[in-house]
Image (spheres, rainbow, N blue to C red):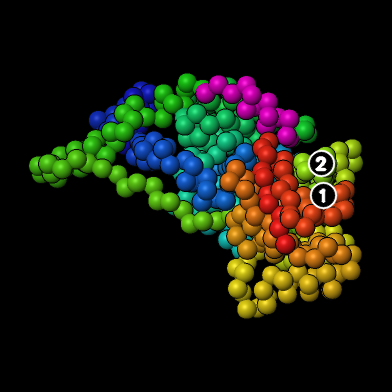
Amino acid sequence: MLSHPEQLERLRRACPEAEKAAVLAGDPCFDRMLAARPYRERFRRALGLRRGQRLIVVNSTWNPEGLFGSGGGQDVLPSLLPRLAAELPADDYRLAAVLHPNIWYGHGPGQIRVWLDRARRSGLTLIDPVHAWRQALLAADIVLGDFGAVTYYAAALGCPVLLAAAGEERLDPEAPLAAFVRDTPRLDPQGPLREQFEELLARHRPLAGPAEFTTSAPGASAELLRRHFYTLMDLAEPVAPALLEPLPLPPYDPPLRTHPLDVRARVRGLDVVIERSAGHPYDADGEAHRAVHEDTRDPGDLETADVIWRDGPPDDPRMGGPASWTAEMLHRHPHCSLAAYVSGPDRCTVRARGHGVFQLSAGPAADADPAVYASALHAWLAHSGEVPPGGATLRVHVAGGMHPVVCTR
């Protein structure tokens, strides 16, 4: 089964005896992605992406020269993952990893999760390598990959791609994949990452090759395959159209960041600019504070936290309710100034030391992580001192947008 006449030409040169057995049948995998394109925003929401966030999908094929490689001297991933978490603002970028199924089978799921533990605590999502990788590609803003088929599919969809591992020696130099590897921008693993991604997005023009050579019959693979199968069986085809199963909507899987976050805030009136990351450069702008999830791996992180937060339903009997939990946090951790109980995708209950309990809720145009709202209130109180009796509406600036957040008692 071949997806393009170009493959037939190379097969003819490499093994003329096989030509008669070759069948041009399109690409059902790519056809399913093409059909699911209108649902991109649903796939993004399934990953918990917020307005203004960019999704970077890290993709690796399954041999030593791939991005998830052998761990040798040319393997950039071990040093790249912590830098991605540190250099990319947590609310501007999301990270997800699509690893070839043979990587999972070869090393075992437990070992993969151990190797990627810190990255996962910093917000990396591991994508189901069988059932959800296509949806992740459709949701992606950037694919950071190698010479594997998934990266090529991303380029065929028009997604901006950076190569972090080329593996040119493994490729037929006459294959379209080899031309793609030669033409695609390369990641400079030593250079600033954020600037490279922003430049890629600004200069991106879809490559013609991947879209042309992935399939010569877009949208027609089901029809071609069924016709061939019924011909082999010497049976008449059914009258009904041949159709592929649509890509399912993955379960809702927002990130759970339990690695401490460094927060920079700039306050001017009711406007609060926030940037959170796993590590800021020393010359970053704004007043600094530290925000830590209660489920951090190191309990010592809580002793130095200015803001502590957790996520959960407001009626969780184990927590005793948001008011009780926030009081417990401030009592248990004297250094902490504000505790936030995130009870929904757009709201949280906060207790600020010396100020009491507040409800923070997103206005109609807001769409950011409520833990950001808590950090914004902490910075605003440190700068302004007091919430008026009638409450206040903060204008929280994050991920390139402004998010009105109503603060009431």
Q: Amino acid at mark 1?
A: Trp
* Residue 95, above or below 114: above
Which of the image's four quarters has the C terminus? bottom right
Q: In front: 85, or 284?
A: 284
Query: Which residue carries the number 1 mark?
Result: 380
The x, y position of residue 133, in whole percent, is: 49, 47
As measured in the structure, the alpha-carbon distance from the residue carrying label 1 to the one carrying label 2 is 8 Å
Residue range of the region highlighted in magenta in the rendering? 193-206
Answer above or below: position of 289 versus 221: below
Residue 299 placement (x, y as % from top left): 81, 68
Residue 111: give x, y in percent of width and height.
Answer: 63, 61
Categorize mark 2 by other alpha carbons within 10 Å: few (<14), some (14-19), many (20+): few
The residue at 73%/35% (across/down) is 193
Q: Of the residues under marks 1 and 2, which one precedes in the sequence?
A: 2
- Could you tell me residue 226's position as x and y percent? 21, 41
Give the left or right position of residue 307, taking residue 313 as reference.
Answer: right
At a point 68% along the width and 49% down the height, the residue shown is 405
Residues at marks 1 and 2 touching, judged by CB atoms closer than 8 Å:
no
Is 194 magenta? The answer is: yes
Q: Which residue is mark 2?
A: 269
Q: At numbered mark 1, what does the secondary structure look like: helix, strand or loop?
A: helix
How crowded pointer 1 is (Cα within 10 Å; few <14, some 14-19, many 20+) is rated as: many
Which element carries disc 2, helix, strand or loop? loop
Q: Give the image quarter of residue 192.
A: top right
Residue 249 sits above or below residue 15 on the image: below
> Where on the picture, by quarter, is residue 313?
bottom right
**In terms of image quadrants, where is residue 316?**
bottom right
Task: Say whether residue 372 is visible.
Answer: no
Residue placed most toward the observer, 16 or 376: 376
Say whether residue 246 is magenta. no
Image-based side of 215 in relation to 92, left or right: left
